[in-house]
Amino acid sequence: MNTPAQRSSNGVWAMWGWPIVLGVLTAVGLVSALFSDGGAGDVVAWVTLGIPVAVCVWYGWLRRSRS
């Protein structure tokens, strides 16, 4: 049986989990883009900044056009 504290923490993660993940990816991408000098740092920046953009396009544009 779940305690009230466990239910509360599960509810917080269910609501804020993905926005936090997308925010962390964006922050890592921006820092990587600022401080990388090419090579793997640029790849990390492109990937970590591309994922939130792809999620926004998917949920904002593509899902509306289907309905």
Image: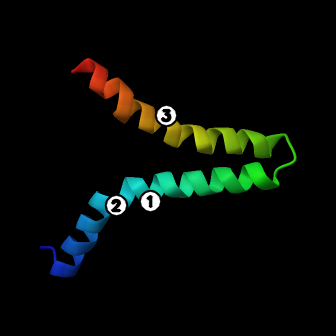
Q: CA distance from mark 3 to mark 1?
A: 16 Å
Residue drawn at 28 percent across, 26 percent down: 64
Q: Secondary structure at mark 2?
A: helix
Residue at horizontal 65 percent and vertical 50 percent from the top: 29
Q: Nearer the viewer, residue 54 or 11?
A: 54
- Residue type, mark 3 in image: Ala
Image quadrant in which the N terminus is located: bottom left
Question: Left or right of 4: which side holds 58?
Answer: right
Question: Which residue lies under the disc numbered 1?
Answer: 20
Q: On the image, numbered disc 3 is attached to which residue?
A: 54
Q: Are marks 2 and 1 in contact (CB under 8 Å)?
A: yes
Q: Earlier in the sequence, mark 3 or mark 1?
A: 1
Label 1 sits on what residue type? Answer: Ile
Q: Quarter of the image holding residue 14? A: bottom left
The CA distance from mark 3 to mark 2 is 19 Å
Q: Earlier in the sequence, mark 3 or mark 2?
A: 2
Q: Are marks 3 and 2 in contact (CB under 8 Å)?
A: no
Mark 2 residue crowding within 10 angstroms, few (<14) / some (14–19) / many (20+): few
In percent of width and height, residue 45 lies at 69, 44
Residue under label 2: 16
Q: Is residue 18 above or below residue 44?
A: below
Provide residue 8's location: percent of width, then percent of height.
22, 74
Secondary element under disc 1, as helix, strand or loop, is: helix
Is 65 left or right of 39, judged from the image as shown?
left
Height in image: 58 above or below 33?
above
Q: Is label 3 in a helix, a strand or a loop? A: helix
Q: Quadrant of the C terminus?
A: top left
Give the total of numbered labels: 3
Residue 50 coordinates in the image, percent (x, y)? 58, 37
Q: Quadrant of residue 40?
A: top right
Which quarter of the picture shows residue 6? bottom left
Image: 49 above or below 6: above
